[in-house]
Image (cartoon, rainbow, N blue to C red):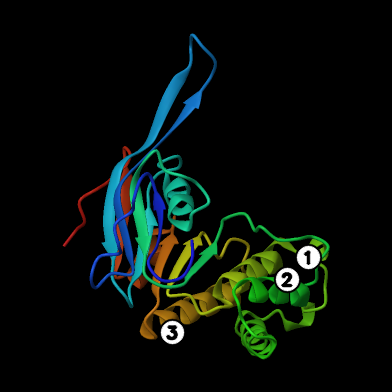
Amino acid sequence: MTEGGASSGVGQAPPVAVGSTLTVSGVHKAFARGIWPRRRVNRVLRGVSFELAPSTMVGLVGENGSGKSVLMRIIAGSLKPDAGTVAIGGRLGYCPQIPMLYDRLSCDETLRLFGHAYGLEDEDIRDQSRRLYGQLGFVRFSGELVMNLSGGTRQKLNLAVALLHSPTLLLLDEPYSGFDWETYQAFWGIADGLRAAGTTILIISHFIQERGHFDRILELRDGLLAPEAD
């Protein structure tokens, strides 16, 4: 997806709803399993619709296999829905559950690569990289190859890539996997600051104690969103 009302889906997608950063409309996704004549269809998403407003932090919850990561991949544009549309107003940042990084690049080289892909100038990339190294506490690994990083440090770099271009909408699929307690606490401080600055954040979460951080909770159940509690 690209900046400014970007969209994905089947057919012509509608614009993002007025007053929203993200509009998801009637999204369906199914996966076929097995071979004929015992081929079965697993309908993961059955018409998911919702909108997210600016300056909100929203938790996406549900049992394992409920389709949380599938929905997030569809919003990010890396997976096509069978039906329905997604519209985004602004810049998208996506932190997948499994880091999509290049093993033979250093952290600095990784951030430069993605920074240029985002259209950032070299000076902005340096400034943003310095800030993110400090916030996430891994500046000493700036010259280290990705292949030599621990799982936690790799996840810090994964998150830094998503934050590098100051996205309007931030999608985070279990972004703190492998973080130590100090970095975990720092993450929520960063997220709170982004929300206060106007960013919309959607986070896949499994921990009940995290729910106090969120303005809303979206629960996927049987391929649909459960009614939200008041």
What whole-number distance in Å separates the C-alpha atoms at marks 1 and 2? 9 Å
Res 164 label: none
Left or right: 88 in relation to 190: left
Nearer-the-camera pick, 138 or 88: 88
Label 3 crowd (10 A; few <14 / some 14-19 / many >=20): few
Question: Farthest left residue?
Answer: 230
Number of the front mark, 1 or 2: 2
Q: Reading the chain from its start, which is encountered first: label 1 or label 3?
A: 1
Residue at 41% in and 71% down: 4
Q: Which quadrant of the structure image shows residue 194? A: bottom left
**Split into 4 quadrants, where in the image is the C terminus?**
bottom left
Q: Residue furthest top?
A: 37
Tell me residue 182's x, y (percent): 59, 77
Of the two numbered discs 2 and 3 in the rendering, the one whose residue sits closer to the viewer: 2
Of the residues shown, which amino acid type is indicated by label 2?
Thr
Residue to which mark 2 is pinned: 110
Residue at image position (37%, 67%) is: 5
Q: Amino acid at mark 1?
A: Val
Q: Secondary structure at mark 1?
A: helix
Q: Residue beneath label 1, please?
A: 146
Q: Amino acid at mark 3?
A: Gly
Q: Position of residue 215 (x, y in %)?
A: 29, 70
Vertical placement of residue 142 versus 75, above or below? below
- Secondary element under disc 2, as helix, strand or loop, is helix
Residue topped by disc 3: 193
Whole-Å distance between the Cαs marked 2 and 3? Answer: 24 Å
Residue 203: x %, y % from top left: 43, 63
Based on the displayed image, in which of its 4 quarters is residue 57 positioned? bottom left
Q: Residue at x 64, y 71 (%)?
A: 117
Seen in the picture, residue 56 relative to 151 is either above or below; the reply is below
Are dots 1 and 2 in contact, CB under 8 Å? yes
